[in-house]
Image (spheres, rainbow, N blue to C red):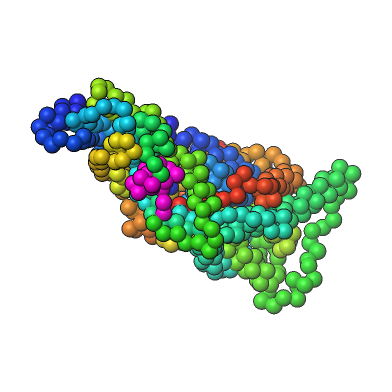
Amino acid sequence: MEIYLPVAEMSVYWLVMIGLGLGVGFLSGMFGVGGGFLMTPLLVFSGIPSTVAVATTLSHVTASSMSGALAQWRKRAVDFTMAGVMLGGGLFGTLLGVWLFALMRRQGQMDLIVSMTYVIMLGSIGAIMLRESLATLKAYRSGVMPSSRRVNHAWMNRLPLKMRFRQSRLYISIIPPVVLGFFVGALGAIMGIGGGFIIVPAMIYLLRMPTNVVMGTSLVQIIALTAVTTVLQATSNYSVDIVLALLLVVGGVIGAQLGVRAGARLRGEQLRLLLALVVLTVCAGLLWGLVAHPRDLYSLTLGAQ
Amino acid sequence: MKRALAGLLLLMSAAGARAEDLVSGISQDIIEITSNYTGTDIVVFGAIERAQRARGRNIVVVVRGPDTPMTVRRRDRVAGIWVNRDSAKFEGMPGYYYLASTEPIDRVAPPRTLTRYGVGVNYLLPSAIGSHHDARPFRAAALRQMRQQGLYTEAPGTIDFLSETLFRTRVPVPAVVARGQYNVEVYLFRDGDVVSAQSTPLFIDQTGIERRLFNMAHNAPLVYGLICVFMAMLLGWISSVLFRRPA
């Protein structure tokens, strides 16, 4: 029942790892997010070294995103222009992130910065989504159709370098998507996430993209980003475990397909409400870890730093 | 193992000196890590030559893993959040340490002797310390955490005597161990002093496909990374084809 991981240099129950992949894959298929923000903490909790967890989760995200993206692509719900523009920023962000990753590990502040970033990102995004989805649900219930989303932010209209995004029916500056891509790329390398939980809300609320193309587009850009980051982590930190990746991926792709089915039965705002609750739960758990009195004030790291 | 024991007995009868002495061996000198490796046991056995009275005599078996650098950090509360502040680095501490003895180690010998031979978890001293503060609480924390993780263990009273002079003990090798050269040390203590000691190397290494994957991750990381990505994309694609709803 146990299998040895050659890079992590430890044994794990392989069924548990497939199960982890399945569960997180289900959520990722349902919400159109990669699920890395759940997978990395779960792997660390199972005793996998955090460097291996961060680097290997990326493969799981690639696979479940691939699975989801193909489904969206068949529905013609992918804006490749937007994905390409965001990726331009994302690649530079990834390079910065891998560099920061190494720097923080030397300083011993890695866990703190990762946790704080998670808490801030998850907390604010979760809160915004919760408020918005509840308001929309309430509006539906009282029979009033929600007002049009197509009110653009005034400051975004004044930015230069405008470009037409046919699939999203948008004519906006490329600066916000490039900056967003950069930011998410950096976060992805540091946290082992694709960044879908940031991209999806940002595309909806900031870029004002139509919800139906948001998922496919974010998935395509996540695939590309995690693929590049996996190779960077493999070549610079040697921390990708291919056996663990295989277990997570097998569970992940099945879970993602099931998740897409389940997600199709729910309305957009219901999905967003559920995702908001998942995000806020993870956030609360991490916040507790930061402020609660640690069981042991000392922490021990083995091996060269 | 039987043959090794028989060989030992031959050696014993051939020896000629007068002082109390020790011969020992291990059941296997290589542990190969394969895909279903979940930890194993080795048997350390030995015999006392020209045995004198049993009173005041102690056998101690130590299995010591390769040295590993340790970094210990202490958290302090800053604005309500627990932050790593002070740290200490230790060199020359073993990554794995198992001790089996006839009696609790503090009753075997005085602390000075134990420190000199590095026998007993509490008597392990780093060869170098990097710290701006008093390193003692950091060292104590490192020992405590290594014990909790099952990497440092003391097991008094686990040496079985098969006869007056023939003994053996079973040493567990857990699943989470570093690869490399281990040393199996057998000490014969008489009235708190070491009168004889033997050291035998034990190698733990990956084998087969695990070894090939590990080597590839380090020697051809680009290809390895690309294979990971390709595998992930391929499986993603396959699942999407398999699960495709019939049109």
Span highlighted in magenta in the image = B112-126
Residue found 58% across the figure and 54% down from its top? B74
Residue found 67% across the figure and 51% down from its top? A290
Magenta run includes residue B114: yes
Query: B85 or B239, which lies in front?
Result: B85
A253 on left or right of B58: right
Query: A206 or A188, which lies in front?
Result: A188
Q: Position of residue B33 (x, y in %)?
A: 33, 40
A52 on left or right of B213: right
Q: State the quadrant of the N terminus of chain B.
A: top left
Is B243 drawn above or below residue A153 in the view shown? Answer: above
Q: State the quadrant of the C terminus of chain B.
A: top right
**Can you tell which quarter of the image residue B198 is in?**
top left
Q: Position of residue A48 (x, y in %)?
A: 49, 45
Residue B179 visible in the snapshot: no
Residue extending farthest bottom? A160
Query: A80 or B19, which lies in front?
Result: B19
Residue found 80% across the figure and 52% down from its top? A132
**Can you tell which quarter of the image residue A202 is in?**
bottom right
Is A208 drawn above or below residue A40 in the view shown? Answer: below
B201 on left or right of B241: left
Q: Position of residue A216 (x, y in %)?
A: 61, 53
Residue B94 visible in the snapshot: yes
Magenta run includes residue A48: no
Query: A164 or A235, which lies in front?
Result: A235
Q: Position of residue B99 (x, y in %)?
A: 37, 37
